[in-house]
Image (tube, rainbow, N blue to C red):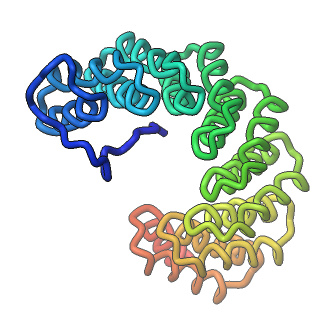
């Protein structure tokens, strides 16, 4: 996830003068304006002026936006350099955002060690937003490379942060990680933690995952309850799949009417994939 500072609410007014002595805030806002207008070169020049000012607020903010702009232009090396300028701005409070973006870019480029170092820098900053995001990203990176313990530790840092979005997301990630490792109880506890967060989007998905976990363990009642919780949420992503899974679970148990009702919920959801499959299964039943 890209960490971009918005220009909204800035009191200084950007001008189009192009003067070398333009205030850092003006240079930043001019960059944002020219970016919005499609003037890539003008935006790059203005952002660079803000960066060169070494202003503790506007230099790293401009570095983030310049990095994102260069990424969109396919200039990966330029983006890396921009993010590193933001990190090296000299303000430890401003470095976490560029470090998070650099880590994400390096991970996408397959530079595991570089990404890990950048994410760790953002985590170590203790920034209330960038640090938990970096912890989740680091967890994903390590999980993808088979470092289960490292991934779990990184996810736990995000959980411990209490971040409204990243903490429950990290709980879901831990649940998935432990489920893949065969740690049913650990996965169940992690999914439940995400469910208990009440997060509008993450809790329903965690309930559906918990349903799958319990169904695979033969816990029919537990799986049924978890699937129903996901269905009742009305979440457009989690609910249709949970209804389909519940229908399959009930069909396997010989509960034809219950299965048909669950399949109908999947059909009524309008989800293209779930509704089509549920309709075929209902017809077969």
The residue sitting at 18% across, 38% down in the picture is 14
Residue 283: give x, y in percent of width and height: 49, 77
Please, is residue 232 above or below residue 191 in the view? below
The residue sitting at 43% across, 33% down in the picture is 57
Position of 128 with respect to 177 (left or right) is: left
User: Looking at the image, which is closer to me, 265 or 234?
Assistant: 234
User: Looking at the image, which is closer to me, 201 or 116?
Assistant: 116
Please, is residue 49 above or below residue 249 in the view? above
Position of 21 with respect to 230 (left or right) is: left
Residue 247: give x, y in percent of width and height: 63, 75
Please, is residue 3 above or below residue 221 in the view? above
Position of 248 with respect to 107 (left or right) is: right
Position of the C terminus, as image quadrant, is bottom right
The residue sitting at 58% across, 33% down in the picture is 93
Q: Which picture quadrant has residue 226?
A: bottom right
Residue 174: give x, y in percent of width and height: 76, 46
User: Looking at the image, which is closer to me, 143 or 170?
Assistant: 170
Q: Residue furthest bottom?
A: 257
Q: Residue furthest left?
A: 17
The residue sitting at 23% across, 21% down in the picture is 44
Please, is residue 32 above or below residue 171 in the view? above
Count up the numbered dots.
Answer: 0
Position of 119 with respect to 28 (left or right) is: right
User: Looking at the image, which is closer to me, 179 or 34?
Assistant: 34
Residue 178: give x, y in percent of width and height: 82, 45
């Amino acid at each position: 996830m890209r960490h971009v500072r918005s220009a909204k609410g800035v009191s200084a007014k950007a001008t189009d003068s192009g003067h070398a002595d333009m205030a850092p805030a003006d240079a930043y806002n001019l960059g944002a304006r020219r970016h919005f207008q499609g003037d890539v070169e003008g935006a790059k020049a203005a952002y660079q002026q803000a960066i060169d000012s070494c202003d503790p607020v506007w230099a790293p903010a401009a570095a983030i936006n310049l990095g994102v702009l260069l990424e969109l232009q396919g200039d990966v090396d330029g983006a890396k350099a921009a993010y590193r300028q933001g990190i090296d701005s000299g303000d430890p409070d401003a470095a976490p955002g560029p470090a998070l973006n650099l880590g994400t870019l390096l991970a996408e480029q397959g530079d595991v060690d570089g990404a890990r170092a950048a994410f760790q820098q953002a985590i170590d900053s203790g920034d209330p937003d960038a640090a938990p995001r970096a912890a989740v990203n680091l967890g994903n990176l390590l999980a993808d490379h088979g470092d289960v313990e490292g991934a779990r530790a990184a996810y736990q840092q995000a959980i411990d942060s209490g971040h409204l979005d990243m903490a429950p997301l990290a709980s879901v990630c831990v649940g998935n990680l432990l489920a893949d490792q065969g740690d049913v109880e650990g996965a169940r506890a992690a999914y439940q933690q995400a469910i208990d967060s009440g997060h509008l989007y993450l809790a329903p998905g965690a309930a559906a995952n918990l349903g799958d976990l319990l169904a695979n363990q033969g816990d029919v009642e537990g799986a049924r309850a978890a699937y129903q919780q996901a269905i009742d949420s009305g979440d457009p992503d989690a609910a249709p799949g949970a209804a389909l899974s519940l229908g399959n679970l009930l069909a396997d148990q010989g509960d034809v009417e219950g299965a048909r009702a669950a399949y109908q919920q999947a059909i009524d959801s309008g989800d293209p994939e779930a509704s089509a499959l549920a309709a075929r299964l209902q017809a077969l039943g």
